[in-house]
Image: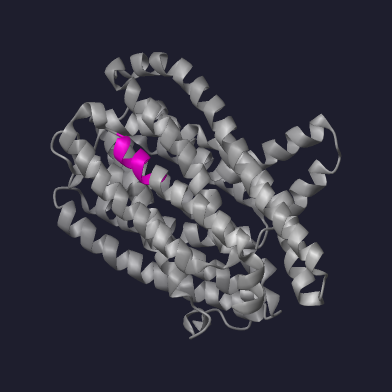
């Protein structure tokens, strides 16, 4: 489903500095654009309304509520994101395009029902003191955002990358504008503004999807047919998304590091701000990741399997395998170098940001730890991508399950040891998984011909 590579290769073939810069800029926008636009939209909403919304804590309550909506909607839909992507890829390969839109309808119907029921229960149990308007808006927002993740995955498979970024820009611009106009309704107004922007974003996505894949049926569930649904991919999506948020949740709900914000929701100022700043450093690393993986690696990958199918010589097959392995090594080293540069830049400006936010400089070491962890997370994503291409799904299940388990265990240990060890749990979990993952990648590449000819 990797369509971005066509555009990136076209830019890179120009053999000019401008073409290379455009390719990396394009990859950075596509890889991180939706996430950055989402964060900037929520921050802009807070900055524009903090002086006029009453009570004063309503803006913080809004931002924390949206953070929980994003976190738990990702965990919920993670079980279907990769599995549905694989289903669409297989059907496109078989030229059975008529099944794609109807199954998208089936997935969104299922997600709508499950997310609606779960969020309704959560609203009634955890927010009894909030207004009915808040509870209804919360349920609607969680349901819409859950569907947006599925639609984003679907549009990525359709190679509509520019459209995704444009829709996110429009959606979050509407979020900011609507929240500002509805600020008189305090917390409920901010949340309604968020909902309006998300509905517009999802609506734009649905228009693109229905135009691309006309079908006679609107809803079907062939995705779950035996042989077409891969439970291993569902586990990978679940383990990875829960693993990414596990340490944040533990800091939120630890009595020493978290504090109540609204209803049952809690936040951790000392942990959340360093983590947010560290994640900004992912942007250049994601650009490198996409350019390397979707240009050279995909080209050699395609040549390797085309030669296998069409009877290419063994020497050519081995050469393509060696080039794939070399591309992975170069890509990992480039990610590490660019992440180190981004980390140094953020470290330089971090003291001023901490002063502006009133955060003690004692937490600067936590930021440095998180910057290293963010770099390792990009490498971990690259490893996951390689195993997805090689279709070695149970290795992915083992790696992501290990990541989730180690993050919980190591974060618990770091909380028990005290502030000087905060953040090391997430870092240690990623370090172990990246080390094992790189070893397994090397092992798999060395055995690729055997696995291809003898085990498939």
Q: Is residue 287 left or right of residue 306?
A: left
Q: Is residue 424 magenta?
A: yes
The image shows residue 197, relative to residue 368, as above or below, that is below
Rendering quarter of residue 454: bottom right
Residue 115, horizontal then vertical, whole percent? 34, 64
For this orientation, the residue located farthest to the bottom is: 226
Q: Is residue 56 left or right of residue 197?
A: left
Rendering quarter of residue 112: bottom left
Residue drawn at x 59%, y 34% as measured from the top left: 284
Residue 359, horizontal then vertical, whole percent? 29, 19
Quarter of the image for the C terminus: give it: bottom right
User: Taking the image as drawn, is residue 200 in sight?
Assistant: no
Residue drawn at x 51%, y 43% as measured from the top left: 378
User: Taking the image as drawn, is residue 213 in sight?
Assistant: yes
Residue drawn at x 83%, y 69% as measured from the top left: 313
What's the magenta region?
A: 423-430
Q: Is residue 162 left or right of residue 222?
A: right
The image shows residue 401, relative to residue 394, as above or below, that is above
In this view, the residue in front, 193 or 432, is: 432
Residue drawn at x 75%, y 47% as measured from the top left: 8
Residue 175, horizontal then vertical, whole percent? 46, 42
Residue 128, horizontal then vertical, whole percent? 14, 52
Q: Is residue 252 magenta?
A: no
Magenta segment main secondary structure: helix
């Amino acid at each position: 489903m990797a369509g971005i590579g066509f555009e990136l290769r076209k830019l890179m073939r120009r053999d000019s500095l401008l073409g290379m810069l455009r390719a990396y800029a394009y990859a950075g926008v596509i890889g991180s654009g939706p996430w950055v636009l989402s964060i900037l939209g929520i921050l802009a909403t807070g900055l524009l309304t903090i002086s006029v919304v009453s009570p004063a804590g309503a803006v913080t309550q809004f931002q924390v509520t949206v953070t929980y909506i994003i976190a738990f909607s990702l965990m919920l839909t993670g079980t279907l994101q990769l599995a549905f992507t694989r289903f669409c890829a297989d059907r496109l390969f078989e030229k059975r395009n008529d099944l794609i839109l109807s199954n998208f309808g089936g997935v969104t119907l299922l997600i709508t029902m499950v997310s609606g029921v779960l969020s309704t229960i959560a609203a009634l149990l955890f927010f009894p003191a909030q207004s009915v308007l808040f509870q209804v808006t919360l349920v609607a927002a969680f349901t819409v955002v859950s569907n947006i993740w599925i639609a984003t995955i679907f549009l990525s498979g359709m190679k509509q990358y520019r459209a995704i970024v444009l829709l996110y820009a429009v959606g979050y611009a509407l979020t900011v504008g609507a929240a500002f106009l509805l600020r008189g309704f305090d917390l409920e107004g901010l949340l309604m503004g968020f909902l309006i922007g998300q509905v517009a974003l999802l609506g734009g996505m649905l228009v693109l999807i229905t135009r691309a894949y006309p079908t006679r049926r609107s809803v079907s569930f062939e995705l779950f047919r035996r042989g077409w649904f891969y439970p291993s991919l569902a586990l990978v999506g679940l383990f990875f998304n829960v693993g990414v948020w596990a340490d944040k949740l533990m800091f939120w709900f630890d009595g020493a590091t978290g504090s109540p914000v609204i209803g049952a929701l809690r936040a951790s100022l000392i942990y959340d701000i360093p983590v947010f700043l560290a994640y900004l450093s992912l942007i250049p690393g994601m650009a490198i990741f996409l350019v390397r993986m979707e240009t050279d690696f995909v080209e050699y990958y395609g040549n390797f399997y085309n030669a296998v199918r069409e009877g290419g010589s063994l020497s050519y097959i081995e050469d393509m395998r060696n080039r794939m392995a070399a591309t992975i090594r170069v890509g990992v080293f480039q990610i590490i170098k660019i992440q180190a540069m981004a980390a140094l830049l953020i470290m330089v400006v971090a003291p001023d940001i901490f002063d502006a936010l009133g955060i003690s400089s004692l937490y600067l070491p936590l930021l440095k730890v998180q910057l290293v962890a963010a770099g390792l997370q990009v490498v971990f994503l690259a490893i996951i991508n390689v195993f997805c291409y090689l279709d070695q799904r149970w290795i992915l299940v083992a790696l992501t399950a290990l990541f989730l388990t180690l993050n919980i265990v190591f974060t618990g240990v770091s909380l028990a040891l005290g502030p000087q060890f905060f953040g090391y749990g997430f870092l240690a979990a990623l370090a172990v998984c990246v080390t094992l993952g790189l070893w397994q990648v090397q092992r798999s590449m060395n055995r690729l011909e055997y696995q291809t000819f003898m085990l498939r």
